[in-house]
């Protein structure tokens, strides 16, 4: 699903009005009616106090439509107009009158702290103060109102965006922003719902299709795309019945050092679980028994050194090399890595200590084969590209980095981001149970395993990250977050492939 900017959404709004020949009031009615339906479906006529806070722009107009419809259906509604300015939008005014007519009451006006209503923890608040039109931080009594809603302990549903959250930048540290429990957002998700610094504000997000112009939505160039099951499924290549293991490629997994052979077991297993035809493993001698015993499906080659990688020599011609897990970064290993890079033309997957070696020996970056996939977590990323001010600057820096070295970068996190230089893809599978040792080793194996099956590196990265998260979701259903360990993610990858093609299953 495309993630559009506020400017693009406004343009889509205008194109829709023109092409459908409808008024903006009609479009507001359509959008806000969906919000009402969603609330009505969930509350089922419950006898609770609903407090609706409306700004004076179009987000406030949406709030007034919701208020009118809830009132009509017999809900106990109190409406507060947050009077931060006298410049009311036309559709706000239309719906202000409609609300008054429907309810025979005047909404309460909030223009200073003394006007704040008491909010009980059992109340249901609707935040329709600001949407995508926020252009400066909320200040003074307005900021206090946002915090008053947050501190009330009441359930808060945000319309389109939590108020105080900018669509295109990170709010300052002391900024007042609504912390919504739930956000019903119009047409496309907003980028800030997925960035580590801002994702806490939106709570659970649901996208409402308000029927903006299809042709516009199809044509518009989105800066980022959200990857859910539908998008991931389109990337999957079904197997030909008449095929053999040679058709699914050969991955060579290189890494490991004394005490860190487990990471190699996890990566290598995941290579085959992801469907690669063959998997060879190159490790220091000390890992021989461990690997042969725990993963007999792999072919094994050892370094001359007992404890670390010193010379990665093989006669193999793998389709992809997955490098770095548990490798350490001694000077001997750096030398071996350099020699490996010099011999390799095909895109590689580089993870963990492979990334750390790149950060400490920048000249190696120039040796990376084109379209290689790097899979850092935020700390490894910082070592690679330096510090950033906020998530937006981080994204800019990553874009430049990926363009400069012609690589693909997977930034691991609650929502992993995949950067191709031109586009950004945001993964929407996975859960907090996956924050566990070895989870990244499994991901490297999955992506490399897909690369060896002739998935383009970018496609392998996007599909691999999605499947990794989906498998984690399946594991979490069975085991809960705490007990989930990374071997489970690898072992359940088969179920993830099945779930990818299965509409009936919830995940
Ligand atoms: N996209 C679509 O297709 C549809 C969109 N719809 C809805 O429209 C919403 C966007 O509405 P909107 O443009 O009127 O902006 P909104 O967020 O209500 O802000 C209002 C005004 O607040 C002001 N202001 C800003 N910051 C401020 C501050 N810190 N402190 C004080 N004032 C501040 C600023 O005015 P300024 O003072 O800068 O002139 C701004 O214009 C969108 O989120 C969705 O809910 C649907 O109805 C239908 C389909
Ligand atoms: K809002």
Image: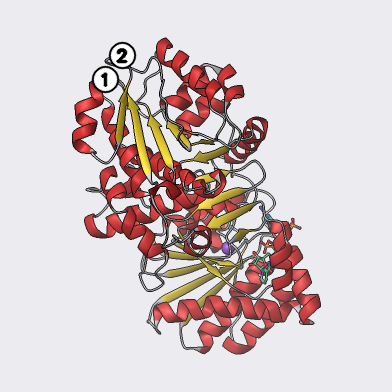
Whether pointer 2 and pointer 1 mark residues with C-beta atoms closer than 8 Å, the reply is: yes
- The residue pinned by badge 1 equals 285
> Marks 2 and 1, Cα distance to the nearest angstrom?
6 Å
Q: Quadrant of the C terminus?
A: bottom left
**Vertical order, 192 against 252 (above or below):** below
Ligand 2 image position (quadrant): bottom right
Foreground residue among 402 and 65? 402
Give the residue at x 56% y 47%: 456
Give the residue at x 42% y 26%: 315
Q: Quadrant of the N terminus?
A: bottom right
Foreground residue among 17 and 448? 448
**Vertical order, 506 against 194 (above or below):** below
Foreground residue among 209 and 94? 209
Residue lying at the far top of the rendered structure: 331
Residue 271 lies left or right of residue 103; in this view the side is left
Residue 16 spot, x, y in % from top left: 75, 74
Residue 403 spot, x, y in % from top left: 67, 35
- The residue pinned by badge 2 equals 305
Give the residue at x 60% y 58%: 112
Question: Which numbered disc flags the more N-terminal residue, 2 or 1?
Answer: 1
**Vertical order, 505 against 244 (above or below):** below
**Vertical order, 251 against 386 (above or below):** below
């Amino acid at each position: 699903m495309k993630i559009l900017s506020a400017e693009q959404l406004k343009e889509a709004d205008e194109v829709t009005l023109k092409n459908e020949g409808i008024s903006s009031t009609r479009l507001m009615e359509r959008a806000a009616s969906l919000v009402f339906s969603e609330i009505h479906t969930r509350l089922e006529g419950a006898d609770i106090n609903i407090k609706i806070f409306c700004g004076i722009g179009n987000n406030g107009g949406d709030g007034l439509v919701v208020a009118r419809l809830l009132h009509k259906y017999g809900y106990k509604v109190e409406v507060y107009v947050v009077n931060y300015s006298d410049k009311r939008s036309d559709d706000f005014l239309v719906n202000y009158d409609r609300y008054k007519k429907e309810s025979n009451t005047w909404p309460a006006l909030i223009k200073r702290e003394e006007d704040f209503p008491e909010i009980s923890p059992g109340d249901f608040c609707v935040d329709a103060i600001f949407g995508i039109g926020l252009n400066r931080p909320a200040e003074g009594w307005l900021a206090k109102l946002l915090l008053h809603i947050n501190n009330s302990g009441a359930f808060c549903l945000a319309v389109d965006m939590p108020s105080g959250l900018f669509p295109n930048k990170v709010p300052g540290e002391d900024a007042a922003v609504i912390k919504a429990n739930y956000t019903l957002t119009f047409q496309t998700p907003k980028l800030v719902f997925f960035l580590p610094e801002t994702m806490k504000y939106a709570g659970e997000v649901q996208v409402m299709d308000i029927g903006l112009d299809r042709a516009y939505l199809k044509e518009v160039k989105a800066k980022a795309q959200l990857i859910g099951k539908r998008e991931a499924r389109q990337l999957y290549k079904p197997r030909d019945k008449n095929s053999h293991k040679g058709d699914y490629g050969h991955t060579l997994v290189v890494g490991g050092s004394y005490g860190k052979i487990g990471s190699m077991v996890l990566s290598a297993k995941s290579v085959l679980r992801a469907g690669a035809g063959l998997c060879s493993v190159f490790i220091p001698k000390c890992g021989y028994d461990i690997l042969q015993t725990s993963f007999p499906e792999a072919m094994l080659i050892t370094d001359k050194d007992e404890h670390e990688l010193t010379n990665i020599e093989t006669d193999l011609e793998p389709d992809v090399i997955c490098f770095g897990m548990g490798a350490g970064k001694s000077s001997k290993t750096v030398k071996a890595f350099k020699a490996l890079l010099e011999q390799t033309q095909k895109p590689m997957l580089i993870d963990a200590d492979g990334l750390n070696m790149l950060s400490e020996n920048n000249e190696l970056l120039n040796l990376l084969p084109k379209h290689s996939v790097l899979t850092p977590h935020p700390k490894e990323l910082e070592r690679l590209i330096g510090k950033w001010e906020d998530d937006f600057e981080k994204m800019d820096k990553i874009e430049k980095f990926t363009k400069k070295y012609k690589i693909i970068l997977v930034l691991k996190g609650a929502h992993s981001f995949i950067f191709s230089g031109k586009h950004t893809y945001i993964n929407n599978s996975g859960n907090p149970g996956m924050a566990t040792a070895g989870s990244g080793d499994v991901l490297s194996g999955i992506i490399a395993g897909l690369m060896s099956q002739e998935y383009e590196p970018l496609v392998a990265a996007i599909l691999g990250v999605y499947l990794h998260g989906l498998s984690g979701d399946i594991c979490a259903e069975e085991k809960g977050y705490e007990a989930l360990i990374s071997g489970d993610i690898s072992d359940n990858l088969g179920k993830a492939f099945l779930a990818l093609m299965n509409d009936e299953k919830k995940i």
